[in-house]
């Protein structure tokens, strides 16, 4: 068998990195490093995959001297490894491997009206995050070239319990362009969970809702209505996911092709939700 080329190694390694479960990037990276056995190749050729992972996951980052975290997203990417924080009005260099920020520099704010809209939305978003994501949530309103985007990230990493998960959502806010009345607001909500106690089970759920919101010249009133609509939609989505899992014992599990598990004993579907994955089903 011919040896795998460097280009193929990079392709495979990059694919592993980009699909690392939330909270397990370091483990995946170290495993890929052992498989490649070439740190120079990994550092030089896989850095783009690492950057794509961080940007796609809305990885939170703490800036020195700034109270609240910001996020690494496509909406505050300045290029050449630099990002900016809307709240502190600072740009920074981001190390995608170490996940650290450095070289903070002043970043110019948007124009007066744009900043007024952004601040009104940020104030309402802060209230929403404090109420619903108090322990692990970060929410930022990005305003760039007159386009407003709300990004939310929340995660729970519990490796001792063999479970990690991340919530991400983004909303394209229809304000700042002079339009008023009922406007369309598009969003994307993603939930990813990995449970790996004596097994390997992953959930990845995605929804792209389209909402109607009323926009007026009143910044505060409009911002409240927008965040109210987001709160209702994200709550509805979360409840739907929970309801789906509550019904899995009567639907999805029964649709499995294997009629009996490897134990040759029938499964009590009424107790399906209480089984330890990988322990009861060995």
Image (cartoon, helix red, strand yellow):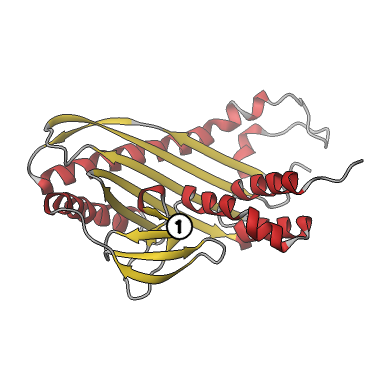
Camera-nearest residue between 88 and 231: 88
Instruction: Report the label total.
Output: 1
**Residue 69 falls in image quadrant:** bottom left
**Residue 164 falls in image quadrant:** bottom right
Query: In the image, what residue occupies the spot 50% across and 54% down?
Result: 54
Residue 238: x %, y % from top left = 41, 40
Query: In the image, what residue occupies the spot 78% across and 60% down?
Result: 37
**Residue 139 falls in image quadrant:** bottom left
Quadrant location of the C terminus? Answer: top right
**In this picture, residue 241 sits left or right of residue 265:** left
Residue 165: x %, y % from top left = 53, 51
Residue 218: x %, y % from top left = 7, 44
Q: Residues within 10 Å of mark 1 (few under 14, many from 20)?
A: few
Quick one: which residue is furthest to the bottom in this view?
65
Camera-nearest residue between 74 and 41: 41
**In this picture, residue 57 sits left or right of residue 97:** left
Camera-nearest residue between 33 and 25: 33
**In this picture, residue 265 sits left or right of residue 187:** right
Q: Secondary structure at mark 1?
A: loop
Query: In the image, what residue occupies the spot 71% across and 45% down?
Result: 12
Q: Which residue is mark 1?
A: 80
Question: Does residue 209 lie above or below 100 as drawn?
Answer: above
Res. 262 visible in picture: yes
Question: Does residue 78 lie above or below 204 as drawn?
Answer: below
Quadrant location of the N terminus? Answer: top right
Camera-nearest residue between 192 and 41: 41
Residue 253: x %, y % from top left = 64, 30
Res. 279 visible in picture: no
Quick one: which residue is furthest to the right in this view?
1
Query: In the image, what residue occupies the spot 18% across and 40% down?
Result: 175
């Amino acid at each position: 068998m011919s040896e795998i080329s460097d280009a193929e190694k990079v392709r495979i390694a990059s694919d592993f990195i980009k699909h690392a479960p939330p909270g397990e990037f370091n483990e995946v990276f170290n495993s890929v490093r052992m498989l490649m056995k070439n740190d120079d190749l990994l550092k030089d050729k896989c850095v783009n995959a690492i950057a794509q992972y961080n940007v796609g996951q809305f990885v939170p980052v703490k800036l020195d001297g700034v109270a609240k975290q910001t996020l690494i997203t496509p909406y505050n990417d300045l290029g050449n490894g630099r990002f900016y924080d809307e709240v502190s009005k600072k740009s920074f260099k981001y190390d995608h491997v170490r996940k650290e920020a450095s070289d903070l520099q002043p970043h110019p704010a948007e124009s007066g009206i744009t900043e007024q809209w952004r601040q009104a939305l940020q104030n309402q978003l802060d209230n929403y995050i404090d109420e619903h994501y108090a322990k692990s949530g970060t929410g930022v309103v990005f305003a760039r070239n007159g386009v407003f985007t709300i990004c939310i990230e929340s995660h729970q990493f519990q490796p001792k319990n063999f479970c990690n998960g991340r919530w991400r959502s983004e909303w394209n806010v229809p304000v700042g362009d002079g339009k008023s009345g009922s406007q369309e607001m598009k969003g994307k909500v993603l939930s990813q969970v990995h449970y790996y106690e004596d097994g390997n089970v992953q959930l990845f759920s995605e929804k792209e809702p389209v909402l109607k919101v009323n926009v007026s010249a009143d910044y505060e009133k409009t911002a409240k209505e927008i965040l109210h609509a987001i709160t209702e939609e994200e709550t509805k989505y979360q409840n739907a996911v929970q309801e789906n899992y509550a019904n899995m014992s009567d639907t999805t599990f029964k649709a499995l092709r294997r009629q009996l598990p490897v134990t040759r004993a029938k499964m009590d579907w009424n107790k399906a939700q209480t089984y330890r994955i990988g322990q009861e089903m060995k």
